[in-house]
Image (spheres, grey):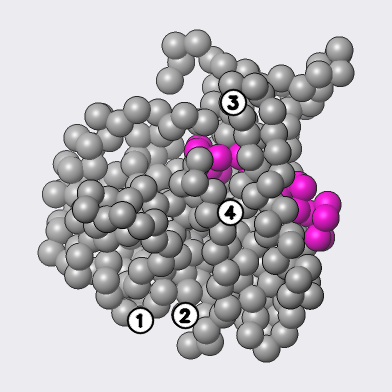
C-alpha cells in the first residue's frame, strides 16, 4: 500500500488532532478535521490553529485538493470555511449529514434559511466512494454509531477514523448523542478492524489514559485488535453494547457541543446574522 505523508496538528483545549495528508509523489494534499479556536465564555473565535496548518502547507508549497470532515464534531468548531477561503480545495463529509441536519435543525429551531440537504458541502460521500489526492486514491467507509454521518477515510495505508476509535488504552466513541447507536458502532468498528493489520489508524482525539503521560495520535489495526480496552478481539457485540450503554450514562456532555453542532452542521459556517447584523448561537434550555 502507498504510504501517504501525514502531518498532525494538536489543539489541546479540545484534545483534537487535525491532519494534512500528502501524496508522496506530488505536492497535493488534503486537510482533515480542522479546528476553529473558540472562547465560549467570550463568544470569540480565533484562527491560530488553522493558521498553523496554512503555514505548513505554504512552507511545503502544497496544493489543497480536499478539506474533509470525518463527521459533525460535537467538541470543536470546524475551520473549513476559513481554510477554503485561504487555500481552495473541495469540502467533503458523509452523505448522512442530511440526517444530522434534520435532527439538529429541529433541536436548534433553525429557520427555513438553513437548508437540510448537505449542499453546504461540495461532496457528500457514500460507502465505497473514492476520491483522489494527487496520485493517491482515498476510499470511504461509512462508520456510523457515534453519529449517523461518521466516515473513515482510507488513504493508502492510513485510515482516518474520526471519533470511532481512540488509542487502545482509552477505547471507543460514545454513542449517546442524537442518532448514535452502540450496536451500529460495534459493526462499524469491525469494518475498520478488517483492514490489513499494518494499517495506520489516525485518531481525531486523545485524552491520555491513566498511566500515560503523553498525547498520542496514531495506532494500528493490529494494536487495536489486540489491546483496545473496549473492543479487542473476543469482545462480542452484546458485551460491547452493554459496556458502551452503561459507560455513556455516566458521561457529561462535551463542553462545546452546543456551539459546535450549530456551526458544523453548516459546514463550519456561522448561522445567518440577525436584523441587527450580529451573529448569535443558541443555547437550548433543558433540551439535552
Q: Nearer the viewer, residue 117 or 59?
A: 59
The residue lying at 73 percent from left, 67 percent from top is: 57
- In the rendered structure, are the residues bearing label 1 and label 2 in contact, judged by CB atoms less than 8 Å apart? yes
Disc with the residue nearer the chain's start (2 vs 3):
3
Q: Is residue 139 above or below residue 150?
A: below
Circle 1 is placed at which residue position? 198
Q: Earlier in the sequence, mark 4 or mark 1?
A: 4
Q: Position of residue 212 (x, y in %)?
A: 27, 55
Q: Is residue 236 magenta?
A: no
Q: Which mark is residue 219?
A: none
Label 2 vs label 3, nearer the camera: 3
Work out whether 209 lies above or below 76. below
What residue is disc 2 on?
157
Q: Nearer the viewer, residue 195 or 77?
A: 77
* 3D distance between C-alphas at marks 1 and 2: 8 Å
| Separation of marks 1 and 3 at Cα, in angstroms | 40 Å
Q: Pointer 4: what residue?
A: 33
| Residue drawn at (54%, 48%) of the image | 11
Amino acid at each position: 500500500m502507498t504510504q501517504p505523508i501525514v502531518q498532525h496538528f494538536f489543539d489541546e483545549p479540545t484534545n483534537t488532532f487535525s491532519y494534512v495528508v500528502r501524496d508522496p509523489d506530488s505536492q497535493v494534499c488534503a486537510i482533515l478535521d480542522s479546528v476553529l479556536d473558540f472562547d465560549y465564555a467570550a463568544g470569540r473565535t480565533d484562527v491560530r490553529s488553522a493558521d498553523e496548518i496554512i503555514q505548513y502547507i505554504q512552507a511545503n508549497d502544497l496544493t489543497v485538493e480536499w478539506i474533509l470532515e470525518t463527521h459533525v464534531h460535537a467538541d470543536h468548531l470546524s475551520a473549513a470555511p476559513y481554510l477554503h477561503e485561504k487555500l481552495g480545495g473541495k469540502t467533503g463529509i458523509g452523505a448522512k449529514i442530511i440526517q444530522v441536519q434534520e435532527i439538529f435543525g429541529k433541536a436548534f429551531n433553525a429557520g427555513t434559511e438553513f437548508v437540510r440537504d448537505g449542499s453546504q458541502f461540495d461532496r457528500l460521500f457514500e460507502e465505497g466512494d473514492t476520491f483522489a489526492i494527487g496520485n493517491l486514491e482515498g476510499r470511504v467507509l461509512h462508520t456510523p454509531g457515534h453519529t449517523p454521518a461518521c466516515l473513515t477515510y482510507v488513504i493508502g495505508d492510513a485510515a482516518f477514523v474520526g471519533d470511532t476509535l481512540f488509542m487502545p488504552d482509552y477505547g471507543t466513541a460514545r454513542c449517546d448523542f442524537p442518532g448514535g447507536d452502540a450496536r451500529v458502532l460495534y459493526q462499524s468498528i469491525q469494518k475498520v478492524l478488517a483492514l490489513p493489520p499494518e494499517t495506520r489508524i489516525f485518531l481525531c482525539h486523545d485524552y491520555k489514559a491513566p498511566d500515560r503521560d503523553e498525547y498520542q495520535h496514531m495506532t494500528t489495526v493490529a494494536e487495536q485488535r489486540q489491546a483496545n480496552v473496549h473492543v479487542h478481539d473476543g469482545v462480542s457485540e452484546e458485551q460491547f453494547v452493554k459496556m458502551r450503554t452503561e459507560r455513556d450514562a455516566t458521561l457529561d456532555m462535551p463542553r462545546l457541543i452546543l456551539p459546535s453542532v450549530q456551526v458544523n452542521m453548516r459546514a463550519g459556517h456561522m448561522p445567518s446574522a440577525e436584523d441587527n447584523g450580529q451573529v448569535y448561537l443558541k443555547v437550548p434550555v433543558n433540551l439535552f
